[in-house]
Amino acid sequence: MKGHWEFSLRRFWTMVIKEFIQMRRDRVTFGMMIGIPLLQLVLFGFVINSDPKHLPAAVLLADRGPHGRTLLGAIRNSGYFDFVREARTEAEAQEMLARGEVQFVVSIPENFTRSLLRGDRPAVLVEADATDPAATGNAVGALRTLIDAALSNDLKGPLAFLAPTVGPVDLRIHAMYNPEAITQYNIVPGLMGVVLTMTMVMITALAITRERERGTMENLLAMPAHPAEVLVGKIVPYILVGYVQVSLILVVARALFHVPMAGSLPLLFAVSLVFIVANLAMGIMFSTVAANQLQAVQMAFFFFLPSMLLSGFMFPFRGMPQWAQAIGEVLPLTHFLRIVRGILLKGNGFPEVIRQLWQIAVFAAVALAIGIKRYRQTLD
Amino acid sequence: MADDLAIDVRGMTKRFGGRTAVDHVDLQVREGEICGFLGPNGSGKTTFIRMLCGLLQADEGSGTCLGRDVIQDSEAIKRQVGYMTQKFSFWEDLSIRENLDFVARMYFVKDRKEVVRESLDRLGLTKRKDQLAGQLSGGWKQRLALAACMIHRPKLLLLDEPTAGVDPRARREFWEEIHELAGQGLTFLITTHYMDEAERCHRLAFILNGKLLTHGRVDEVIEQGHLTTWSVSGPNLLNLAAQLRGRPGVEQAVAFGSVLHVSGSDPAALEQAVAPFRTREREWRQIESGLEDVFIHFMDASKGGGTP
């Protein structure tokens, strides 16, 4: 076939310079690379909440006694429920639920106070719209402990015998690393990986196809250029862009969301390099496979979706079926999420990080190898 | 073969799927020669050139380009060949200077900055060197492309329709420069659709449907056409052309301004066909066939042979 020759640092550097100039000229793309992280931070940081509170609830109050009021007050104070409506009849409450005006109906039955004082353990009915279990799950979970605790203040003195007895085991649940269960602490560091995946794969997926579509590929191929010089030359400028994004997200995470940073930031910056290169290599590989820019974008999305859904960013990794976890283990984002959350929230050091990092490195090497192999040196 | 051949290839063949784009083409071009490469659109000119500079792998064929094996040694050939693509293929989002600089760096040109500056001077683009290449007009783009593909001082230039869409003055200047460079020993293979340009080449190669139909100096090519041409002037030539076309012996009846050229490959049959129209008010003259007449004749002649 054709005579192969040495990789030349000079030609490689020439490619890097060219890519930098072109990147600088493409203001819109450049802006997007800063805009996407900001937009995602706002969307995911402020909008998405896996522990939703202030859910609209209605109350059906058939007993006006003091203990019913105490109970409602406690439920409201949990923060999960906002009592926005009061239903007069059972049918009206049902209708509100069906129309989606409220997500919960709390019914205090007739003679609640009297039954309670008599020790009859009156029923409190909470009806939840469970079409979105994630939205109501935590709220319902909070209810049980809340009701016991709420009445303990009322049931003192002569009424103390009515207070619930202490169970045989004192069960304490202690939420580690994020005791207040603040969603942002989990989401915002994860966003770093998501943003990098989204922009880095996309931008390099376009790199080769753009040359091909504009006809400049023919020119590049007619020059004595090694595939690795061209491909790596196209990757390097975007590593810098990746670091701008990482820094941006870290600043916003700290300033806006007060995400704790328990571990070493230099370590995080260092390991980010491997993840950035992995995504750029993936994009370059798509670029050598795609026939045009549209296909390249589609492929980037094809990679982005499983990365979002199966990496543990959107849904708890352990909650997925085995096969989905197996796919997730291949994706660089899965490992990077563990690394970022580990460093920022748990204060992990290098020994913990390297267990995830090598898997990203393997992914990067394979993707880049396929890319270089597939890079066509001819127009065939 | 003699070592003064810049291009010496035989049996070059390229197939795309079931279609044979270039079909066993032999071509020899001497050093310092300007070879015009002619043929209608889609005849395989570009494919042939791409095979020469290693952009496409030949399915069959052998030979040398600048003394290097055209199949095995395409990387070495690339370093000594300048290839100007049909479509502008430099970076429109780089400035003129940045484009030249990029190319010079890729070829490890010595005294790069000086060479780039000289090149800009010769182009007359020194003042506009920071303008983006994409903002140049068609003619300037062509000149930039030519300058860029010559910056590493190649020995062989493959120019694919270098003057398409360029105004006559710029075309003339372009050809003067080509001749000057050829005088210095550079070899050119130039594709063109313009007959006046073809006539300015030392040698011509005519390719049709991937096959080389004829190859030689301009007069040789015209000779090989074996065409007889009459020129007629007088009133109502349009009508006359319509009447002549389709008569046995008449292959072409084409208006050239105020005269009509009537050609055919059988002189006797042609004479018989035009005889009834040789009236007093028309002036008939037998002339030498032009290149264009010959080429159209070749194209028509090969139509029976399966032109799509």
Image: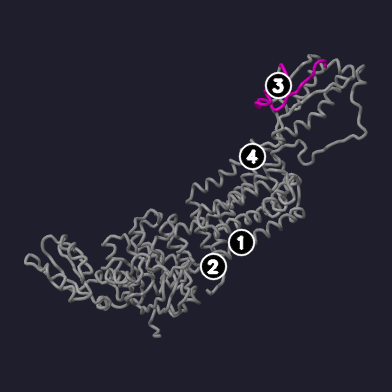
Q: Residues within 10 Å of mark 3 (few under 14, many from 20)?
A: many
The residue pinned by badge 4 equals A44
The residue pinned by badge 1 equals A368
- The answer to which of B40 and A292 lies nearer the viewer is B40
The residue pinned by badge 3 equals A93
Q: Secondary structure at mark 4?
A: helix
Mark 2 → mark 4, Cα distance in angstroms: 42 Å
Q: Earlier in the sequence, mark 1 or mark 4?
A: 4
Q: Earlier in the sequence, mark 4 or mark 3?
A: 4
Q: Are marks 3 and 2 on the same chain?
A: yes
Mark 4 or mark 3, which is nearer to you?
3
Q: Are marks 4 and 3 on the same chain?
A: yes
Tag count:
4
Magenta region, residue range: A88-111
Is A28 magenta? The answer is no
Is A110 magenta? The answer is yes
Q: Secondary structure at mark 1?
A: helix
Q: Are marks 1 and 4 on the same chain?
A: yes
Mark 3 or mark 2, which is nearer to you?
3
The residue pinned by badge 2 equals A226
Indicate the chain on which mark 1 is placed.
Answer: A
The image position of residue B6, as x and y in percent, is: 39, 78
